[in-house]
Amino acid sequence: MVEKNPSYRGRLAPSPTGYLHLGHARTFWIAHQRALAAGGALILRNDDLDAARCRPEFVAAMLEDLAWFGFRWSEGPDVGGPHAPYDQSRRHAHYAAAFDRLRAAGAIYPCTCSRKDVQAAASAPHESPAAPGVGDEPHYPGTCRPDHLAPAERIRRATLPRAGVNWRFRVPEGETLAFADGHFGPQHAVAGREIADFLVWRRDDTPSYQLACTVDDAAMGITEVVRGADLIRSTFRQLLLYRTLGAAAPAFFHCPLVTDEHGVRLAKRHDALSLRALRAAGRTPAALRAGW
């Protein structure tokens, strides 16, 4: 891409856990076009933190499919750039440093609850959190918050190492969080009711999506994040992380999701609508884009 306005920095951040589909392409194309219209840079980041599901063949297919569809980027894992590495699996030190800052600020705490425990609490009759977004984490009831623990247990947990336990961000209960979305307009959520304490670090010593995404977008100077509407709730969490880490938050533009003929949003299991399958069927990028 030819950059005329270096102050604008957008990004594509696919996760190589399968083949890219038409939904990815449309959202990414909006990001691509917004970067072009602004005369800025478009950065490609390989969000490959999920070691169990990310595969080298999916990374290779991702680069090939994006190039075939017409995407061009200024920085990325294949072309390098001033903010390398552009593979999240190689950026652990950045996340660990952010974890240390959050812990020093008293913004996070260790949590011994299993996902099953959290799901059971969130579905209990006395719980009435707002319905989570697509693919969202269950509403956490605050079981392991330090103020809910006996003094001796609170002291013991304060010295726990980073690995071996989950760590959660303590949201400021009752605070109304807000941002202006570039597509959907003003967005609001009440911390503690619609946004519960969320994971920032996992017991296997890896950062959560929320922390890794925030750290990388800040470090790479991203000025606008374009992504699917299913991540609107994640934006509130990430705004809290930006604020606590003392980093400037980017603008956000969330795109409507692409659905199949039954109204179900596209996922990587929709093999027939993967870019690979569409190309094999003789479809062209121009014809696919014309359908939008």
Image (cartoon, rainbow, N blue to C red):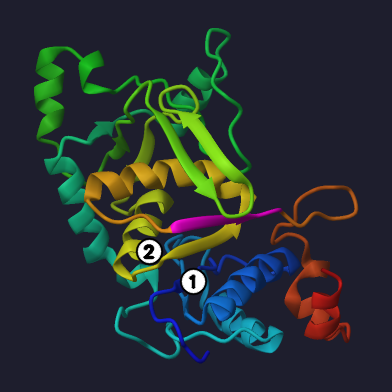
Q: Say which element carries label 1.
A: strand
Judge whether 77 appears above or below 137 on screen: below
Left or right of 228: which side holds 222?
left
State yes or no: residue 60 in magenta: no
Which of 49/249 is in front? Answer: 249
Q: Position of residue 226 (x, y in %)?
A: 55, 62
User: Marks 1 and 2: CB-CB under 8 Å?
Assistant: yes
Dot 2 amino acid type:
Asp
Along the line of sight, the residue nearer the viewer: 228 or 8: 8
Q: Which residue is mark 2?
A: 217
Name above or below for residue 219 compared with residue 251.
below
Q: Position of residue 20 (x, y in %)?
A: 66, 71
For the stretch drawn in magenta, the main secondary structure is strand
- SS for dot 2: helix
User: Label 2 neighbourhood size at 10 Å, few (<14), some (14-19), many (20+)?
Assistant: many
Q: Which residue is the site of mark 1?
A: 11
Give the residues in magenta: 251-256
Measure the C-alpha gap from mark 1 to mark 2: 8 Å
Query: Looking at the image, is mark 1 or mark 2 earlier in the sequence?
Result: 1
Q: Is residue 46 above or below residue 123?
A: below
What is the x, y in percent for residue 65? Answer: 66, 82
Q: Quadrant of the C terminus?
A: bottom right
Residue 182 in the image, given as x and y percentages of width and height:
57, 55
Left or right: 12, with 26 as reference point: left
Residue in view at x 63 percent, y 82 percent:
66
* Residue 66 seen in the current view: yes
- Please state which of residues 54 and 221 is positioned toward the viewer in this rendering: 221
Q: Residue at x 51, y 46 (%)?
A: 180
Q: Quadrant of residue 91?
A: bottom left
